[in-house]
Every structure is written in C-alpha cells, then in structure tokens.
C-alpha cells in the first residue's frame, strides 16, 4: 500500500484524509497545531452534511516530518504555501512520486517548481467544505475533482472521488498548468478572496 501524507489540518486536509482512509489507505495527517493533532487522535475525523462518515486517521505535528512517504497532498492555504511546501518536501522518500498541489492558483505550481520540489500533480477540488471543529467538517455533498499529473497519483485521486461520488476527470502532466489556471478562474469567480487564500469553489467548470 502506497504511503501517503496530507499536509494541513484545515477543512480540505480533513476532507482528503477521511476520503483516503475510507478508500483503504492509511494516510498520516500533519498539522501545525498540537491541539488539532490531539483532537484528531482522540476523535478521528467526522464528515457531516450529506449523510455522515467517520474515519480513524493518524495525525502528527509537522515538526515530526520524516522522509518516508511516496505521495504528499499539500492542503495549506496560499498564505502558508512556503511553509507547507517545506514540510511536504521533507516527507518525501527517495523514490517518491512527489507533491500534489491543491491551492487554486498557478502561483503554487511556480513556487514549487522554482524550489525544485517534485510535483506529482495538481488537484482542482471543486466542492464546498467547512470546518466545524478540529476534527469535524461539513460538506455540500456534491462537486467535482479535476486532476492533472502522474498516473499513480491520479489513481489515488480517483479513489477519493469514488468515496465522495465526485465527478472526476484525469489528465496527464502536460495539463498541470492549464488545470491550475482553471482552478484560479473558478475560485475568483465564486469568491475573489479564495483566489489568494484558497476556498470553496463549487461552480461548474
């Protein structure tokens, strides 16, 4: 089983980690706050709002990052991008696929490439997720996932999409840039501030 890390314990990070766990993976969720680690360790992750789902997920503080993961999903907001990229890069094993970026902006891609970090793909997650507590999120119950990148990373994304019944499209690595720009366009049209910070983007493609 592929070793997967999720960097960031906001609404998107919790949503992804729960989806991965429900797909049969054993993701480790890396958080920047000890309170979040403790809450997730004690309560697991609960996803509510469209039925209810529960997942037991391991969590750790970002300071404990070790290079033992083949794939790292970066779920930090853009205003914490550099910190998130640094943590994600520290998690990758020598044979890693790389980092999957989720920030709705090509800026994230440019920052990662300029730093020399391996990129496994870009995921445009078009749904609305709200954080209720440190270990509970509510989501809208519908949406889509558009991924461009390596095939192995795309298969993981498809597994998450199946759990949440999201419409999913996969493209090769040559489409990473265009998917990143599309994500920015959708985020800006739904909520302008999300183009800078990342946020809810459920408007149709």
Image: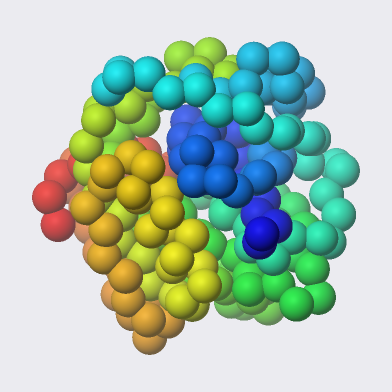
Q: Residue at x 65, y 32 (%)?
A: 57
Please provide percent x and percent y for residue 143: 23, 43
Residue at 45%, 66% (x, y): give it.
155
Instruction: Please give left or right for residue 17 compared with residue 142 in the image.
Output: right
Report the coloring of the rendering. rainbow
x and y, in percent, of residue 118 in the image: 64, 75
Q: Is residue 43 above or below residue 176?
A: above
Q: Quadrant of the C terminus?
A: bottom left
- Which residue occupies 65% across, 45% down? 27
Inspect this view and state whether residue 183 appears. Answer: no
**In which quadrant will I find the N terminus?**
bottom right
**Left or right position of 160 against 192:** right
Q: Residue furthest bottom?
A: 174
- The front one of 55 and 6 is 55
Kindly indicate the quadrant of the structure image that contains residue 61: top right
* Numbered circles on residues, count: 0
Q: Is residue 59 above or below residue 6?
A: above
Within the image, what quadrant is residue 39 found in? top right
Q: Is residue 138 above or below residue 20?
A: above
Q: Dividing the picture into quarters, in which one does residue 147 lie?
A: bottom left
Specify whether 158 is left or right of 83. Answer: left
Which residue is situated farthest in the left direction here? 204
Q: Is residue 166 visible?
A: yes
Give how far across and how far down residue 146 sits, in percent.
30, 61
User: Residue 190: percent from the left, percent from the top?
Assistant: 19, 41
């Amino acid at each position: 089983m592929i070793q997967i890390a999720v960097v960031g314990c906001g609404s998107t990070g919790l949503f992804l980690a729960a989806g991965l766990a429900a797909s049969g993976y054993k993701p480790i969720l890396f958080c920047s706050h000890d309170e979040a680690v403790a809450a997730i360790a004690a309560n697991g992750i609960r996803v509510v709002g469209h039925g209810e789902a529960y997942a037991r997920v391991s969590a750790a503080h970002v300071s404990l990052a070790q290079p033992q993961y083949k794939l790292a999903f970066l779920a930090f907001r853009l205003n914490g991008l550099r910190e998130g990229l640094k943590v994600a890069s520290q998690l990758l094993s020598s044979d890693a696929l790389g980092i999957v970026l989720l920030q709705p902006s090509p800026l994230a891609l440019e920052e990662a490439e300029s730093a020399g970090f391996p990129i496994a793909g870009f995921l445009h997650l078009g749904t609305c997720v709200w954080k209720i507590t440190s270990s509970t999120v509510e989501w809208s119950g519908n949406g889509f996932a558009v991924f461009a990148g390596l095939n192995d990373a795309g298969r993981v994304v498809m597994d998450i999409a199946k759990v949440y019944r999201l419409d999913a499209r996969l493209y090769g690595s040559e489409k990473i840039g265009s998917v990143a720009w599309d994500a920015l366009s959708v985020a800006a049209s739904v909520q302008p501030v999300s183009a800078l910070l990342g946020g809810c983007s459920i408007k149709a493609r």
